[in-house]
Amino acid sequence: MTRALAWLAGLVVLAAVCAAFAPAALVGALVAEATRGELRLANARGTAWNGAADVVAADGRWTVPATWRLDALPLLRGEARVALRPPEGAAGARADVVARGGRIEAHDVAVDIPAASLRMPPGVLAGGEVRLRADSLVHAPERNEGSVRVEWTRARLALPAVGSFDLGTVSATLAGDGATWRGPVQARGGVLVVDGEARIDRAGSDLRLAVVPQPDAPPLLRAALGVPDAQGVVRLDLRGRFR
């Protein structure tokens, strides 16, 4: 979740470009700095006030097109208001963002990205699409507010020495809780039935899952998960750290 907001924060730094007709290409360096190199802009066009570009992951594994419009008058009171929209007829990012004094508010958020953008361990590949929806989110120092729904549809994973398998639809509803985002996560319609809880903060993520392999789960996958308990449930605690 923190990374999902990071690229929104990156585009908000458009407010730092004060020349009325500064080319959109100048925004790229600001986005890279604001996201600590996680994102860059490609094919930037237009101006810093009304522009478009492809938001690209640092490793080039995914691209999300976006256009933006920066309102000039709020800058006079130290506030940046940016409207993000997907290019006409294309998937991408949509949000109305307000930034002031280190506080970022995003309203009517809708982001569609390929599952390849998910941070995975080395050698693990993901397939499918990820949809993020939220009415209102607040990202501020030591305080997050709001609720976001994430759905990973046609979810598929490929693991070294295990092979690929389908997870169906993976979903999570995360709510801001101080400096963290937390909430239930589940998977249905694939070779694993999953229920659990996710906790995400600036440092990383913690997933505590109860996994029930289905009859069509590959034998190698069953072996990799470990021995289930008397109820047929494998309990996992997966932790990841952000760079």
Image (cartoon, helix red, strand yellow):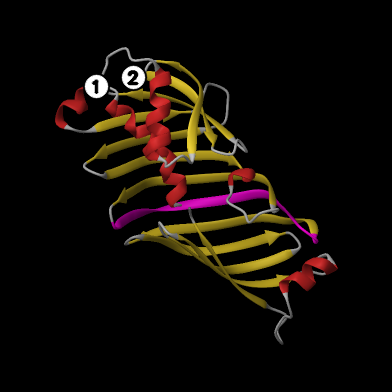
- Secondary structure under badge 1? loop
- Secondary structure under badge 2? loop
**Vertical position of residue 206 compared to residue 106: above or below:** below
Give the residues drawn in magenta, as a range: 142-162
> Which badge, 2 or 1, comes first in the chain's sequence?
2
Mark 1 highlights which residue? Answer: 72
Q: Amino acid at mark 1?
A: Ala
Of 85 and 103, the residue lying toward us = 103
Side (left or right) of 140 relative to 216? left
Percent across and percent down for residue 208 are 55, 71
What residue occupies the far left of the structure in this picture? Answer: 77
Q: Residue at x 27, y 38 (%)?
A: 99
Q: Residue 169's image quarter?
A: bottom right
Percent across and percent down for residue 146 are 36, 53
Q: Would residue 17 be visible to someone looking at this image?
A: yes
- Cβ–Cβ below 8 Å for labels 2 and 1? yes
Mark 2 highlights which residue? Answer: 49
- The reply to whether the magenta stretch includes residue 74 is no
Q: Amino acid at mark 2?
A: Trp
Q: Alpha-carbon distance for marks 2 and 1?
A: 8 Å
- The reply to whether the magenta stretch includes residue 154 is yes
